[in-house]
Image (spheres, helix red, strand yellow):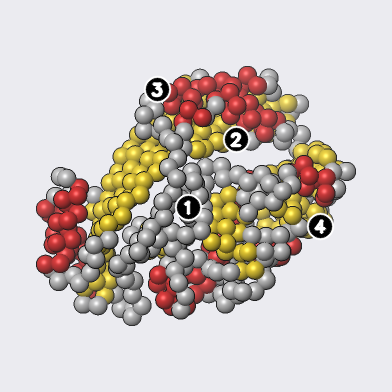
């Protein structure tokens, strides 16, 4: 069935059934995933999906229903599903169908070749990455993962007010994770590159960098317990920010799941900290012209020079707080939640080497493990198994592993001494440069 026609028929059926205002949200996409090991493709998956959901107000309550079928029976199911789910709503706090904004931003189109790239080319990249990693150094014993992932998706939103929005995107990612052995020691590591152009993924570069990262961990050993000056390298800081991103959600704050409730306008971080949410970032994995409710996207500093300027809002949380939405409504399994888009610390001017030189003595943490079990997203406390290397006289020292780094994310924000220039996203919408986070407790 023609999708345009189907969407119009759903909206018309909703109107006839007495659903006062209605909205159709349709998401379709394709994905490809493959991996290589021991010179052979050991993983291969291609999938396509399309789902349409209907939200609508019935007798003053908001109902919801979704389908992956596109026929007359599905239209009836959607309409009846909205009416039935609306009847089960007991709270007076309701979502709403939004009529739309007067204008919507345009995001500069990023060149992409993903849809035209053949499966054969993707499989060849997997094998070439594995080969490059193995040939980079004789100490590379095995490549446990050499993976390629691509995806493309299109979102269409149309409602009974006449709002009609479309957005689309595509991305590709390549990752290699070798295992190295030497003198009875084993080390693991990896390297990932991602973007919108498959042709830009360089198998030789990815394989060699993955091998270099892995080899840098060989011979790692713990350090004595105590308090250390710590730099979180961009990838480790990215993981930490991703774990605690929820504290900036107004939805979580209103449910007392964030200690930032009511802190707008207050100094909550070091003056060197600016935290951006930028849905208009060209080529960003979280870039979008509109959010999950149809509000126009806009760039904002959540923290500006250490001051909390805003939490992230949907229309519902904004109404509750008496402010404007920030355009951060997100669709997750039908429910509208608050989520960041392209979320990152604004980079400074010093590279990692300069941060190390300035620090003098301490640790650079390159990897954090146990982020789900070892971090409390509400209190901000964390105690995480980590690895990295020492910094001695401003230079890289020996590899460090089997240590635990502990602290509190709210306190980390306040204690940040410098933010690096090496902003990276590594295939995620959440990114970070390397950050000198001050002093943390370390146990070996």
Residue appearing at x 27%, y 57% in the figure: 164
Question: For the residues marked 4 and 2, what is the alpha-carbon distance in whole angstroms?
Answer: 29 Å
Q: Left or right: where does residue 202 sit relative to residue 422?
A: left
In this orientation, does residue 42 appear?
no
Instruction: Residue 108 in the image: state x and y as whole percent.
Output: 45, 45
Q: Which mark identifies residue 143? A: none
Instruction: Residue 203 in the image: state x and y as whole percent.
Output: 55, 25
Residue appearing at x 56%, y 42% in the figure: 426
Whichever of callouts 4 and 3 sits on the residue coming sooner in the sequence is 3
Tell whether label 2 touches label 4 (CB within 8 Å): no
In this orientation, does residue 227 appear?
yes
In the rendered image, the residue lying farthest to the right is: 393
The residue labelled by disc 4 is 227
Q: Residues within 10 Å of mark 2 (few under 14, many from 20)?
A: many
Residue appearing at x 38%, y 63% in the figure: 295
Tell whether label 3 touches label 4 (CB within 8 Å): no
Whichever of callouts 4 and 2 sits on the residue coming sooner in the sequence is 2
Instruction: Residue 79 in the image: state x and y as whole percent.
Output: 17, 63
Q: Which mark identifies residue 120? A: 3
Question: Which structural element holds mark 2?
Answer: strand
Q: Residues within 10 Å of mark 3 (few under 14, many from 20)?
A: few
Nearer to us of marks 4 and 2 is 2
Q: Residues within 10 Å of mark 4 (few under 14, many from 20)?
A: some
Whichever of callouts 2 and 1 sits on the residue coming sooner in the sequence is 2
Question: For the residues marked 2 and 1, what is the alpha-carbon distance in whole angstroms?
Answer: 27 Å
Nearer to us of marks 2 and 1 is 1
Question: For the residues marked 1 and 3, what is the alpha-carbon distance in whole angstroms?
Answer: 33 Å
The residue labelled by disc 1 is 280
Question: For the residues marked 4 and 3, what is the alpha-carbon distance in whole angstroms?
Answer: 51 Å
Nearer to us of marks 1 and 4 is 1
The residue labelled by disc 2 is 191
Rendered view: 321 above or below 348? below
């Amino acid at each position: 069935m023609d999708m345009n026609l189907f969407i119009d028929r759903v909206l018309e059926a909703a109107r006839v059934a007495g659903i006062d205002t209605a909205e159709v949200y349709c998401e379709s996409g394709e994905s490809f995933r493959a991996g290589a090991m021991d010179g052979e493709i050991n993983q291969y998956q291609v999938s396509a999906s399309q789902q349409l959901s209907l939200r609508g107000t019935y007798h003053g309550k908001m109902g919801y229903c979704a389908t992956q079928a596109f026929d007359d029976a599905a239209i009836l199911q959607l309409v009846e599903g909205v009416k039935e789910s609306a009847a089960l709503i007991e709270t007076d706090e309701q979502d709403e169908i939004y009529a739309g904004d007067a204008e919507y931003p345009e995001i500069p189109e990023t060149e992409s070749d993903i849809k035209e790239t053949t499966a054969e080319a993707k499989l060849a990249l997997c094998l070439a990455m594995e080969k490059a990693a193995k040939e980079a150094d004789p100490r590379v014993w095995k490549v446990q993962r050499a993976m390629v992932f691509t995806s493309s998706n299109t979102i269409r939103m149309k409602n009974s007010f006449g709002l009609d929005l479309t957005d689309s995107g595509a991305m590709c990612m390549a990752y290699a994770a070798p295992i190295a052995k030497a003198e009875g020691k084993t080390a693991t590591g990896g390297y990932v590159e991602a973007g919108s152009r498959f042709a830009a993924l360089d198998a030789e570069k990815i394989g060699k960098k993955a091998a270099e990262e892995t080899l840098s961990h060989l011979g790692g050993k713990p350090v004595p317990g105590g308090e250390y000056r710590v730099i979180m390298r961009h990838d480790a800081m990215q993981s930490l920010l991703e774990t605690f991103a929820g504290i900036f959600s107004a939805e979580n704050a209103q449910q007392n799941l964030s200690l930032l409730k009511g802190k707008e306008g207050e100094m909550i971080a070091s003056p060197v900290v600016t935290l951006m949410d930028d849905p208009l970032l060209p080529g960003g994995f979280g870039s979008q012209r509109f959010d999950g409710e149809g509000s126009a996207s806009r760039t904002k500093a959540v923290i500006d020079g250490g001051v909390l300027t805003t939490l992230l809002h949907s229309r519902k949380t904004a109404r509750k707080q008496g402010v404007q939405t920030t355009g951060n409504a997100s669709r997750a399994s039908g429910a509208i939640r608050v989520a960041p888009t392209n979320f990152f610390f604004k980079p400074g001017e010093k590279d990692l080497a300069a941060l190390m030189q300035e620090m003098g003595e301490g640790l650079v943490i390159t990897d954090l493990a146990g982020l789900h079990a070892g971090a409390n997203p509400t209190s901000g406390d964390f105690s995480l198994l980590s690895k990295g290397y020492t910094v001695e006289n401003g230079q890289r020292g020996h590899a460090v592993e089997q240590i635990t780094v502990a602290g509190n994310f709210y306190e980390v924000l306040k204690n940040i001494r410098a933010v690096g220039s090496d902003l990276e996203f590594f295939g995620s919408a959440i990114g970070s440069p390397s950050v000198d986070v001050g002093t943390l407790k370390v146990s070996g």
